[in-house]
Image: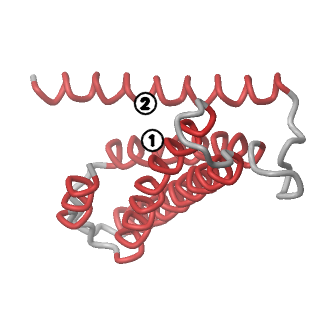
Amino acid sequence: MSSASKLCTLKTQEPDVIMRIIGVLTNVADQLYFPLEHIAWASDQKIISVKSTPWWTASTVCWAVSLYLGLLKAVRHMAILQGHRSCMESDCKMKLSEAELLLVQRNELLNAFRCMGDLAQAIHYLPEGILWSGKLEKWHIGLLGTLTSVISLYQTYQRVIGAKKHAQ
């Protein structure tokens, strides 16, 4: 999985260096998350005899870092798109129409909101003393999870609809 992920990251032709760096760092955080979570789970199931708490903490930190980087990427992309929009207003030749640009900007805004909601949850699950860890009520976690899931489902629906329109 990591070799396929590395190949995909390296093949990306992202013209913005900052976006490329964020993509690589996100990939690293995501790749570290899985083995850490598996070790924590195996410890909880008594498959291996190590303390699970540090492993759960490390996996949650990787999750939070990945979400924070996703938020940074969404904000960076929105800033780049806003620059393109300004260019469109001054009669530059752009590949995207204004409607397409607005659609991409809206999607990035949804990405940012989704990452913020998930990041709030990830921070809640970190050890006490880190920002607001452990301070959210169960209904806060449920609401954040529901909202981010609805955003994700909406984005998936929009991609499917967009793919169908593009195929016609």
In depth, the one of 118 and 37 nearer the eye is 37
Q: Is residue 168 left or right of residue 52?
A: left
Q: Nearer the viewer, residue 155 or 148?
A: 148
CA distance separating discs 2 and 1? 7 Å
Q: Which element carries disc 2, helix, strand or loop? A: helix
The residue to which callout 1 is attached is: 107
Q: x, y (%) of residue 141?
A: 76, 29
Q: Residue at x 22, y 67 (%)?
A: 10
In the rendering, at what x and y percent does residue 139 appear? 82, 22
Q: Residues within 10 Å of mark 1 (few under 14, many from 20)?
A: some
How busy is the neighbourhood of tag 2: few (under 14 within 10 Å), some, or many (20 plus)? Answer: some
Q: Residue at x 21, y 28 (%)?
A: 163
Q: Determine which residue is flagged by label 2.
A: 155
In terms of sequence position, does the residue under pointer 2 or pointer 1 come before the other? 1
Query: In the image, residue 81 lies at what x, y percent?
Result: 41, 60
Quadrant holding the C terminus: top left
Image coordinates of residue 25 in percent, x first then y, are 44, 67
Residue farthest to the bottom, as pictured: 17
Q: Which mark is residue 123?
A: none
Residue 2 occupies quadrant: bottom left
Q: Amino acid at mark 1?
A: Asn
Residue 66 vertical placement versus 107 (above, below): below
Q: Residue furthest left?
A: 168
Amino acid type for the residue under numbered disc 2: Gln
State if disc 1 and disc 2 touch (CB < 8 Å).
yes
- On screen, residue 153 versus residue 146, left or right, reads left
- The answer to whether residue 149 is above or below residue 33 is above
> In front: 43, or 165?
43
- Circle 1 — which element? helix
Identity of the residue drawn at 68% across and 48% down:
51
What residue lies at 28% left-to-right and 49% top-to-bottom?
97
Q: Is residue 136 left or right of residue 44?
A: right
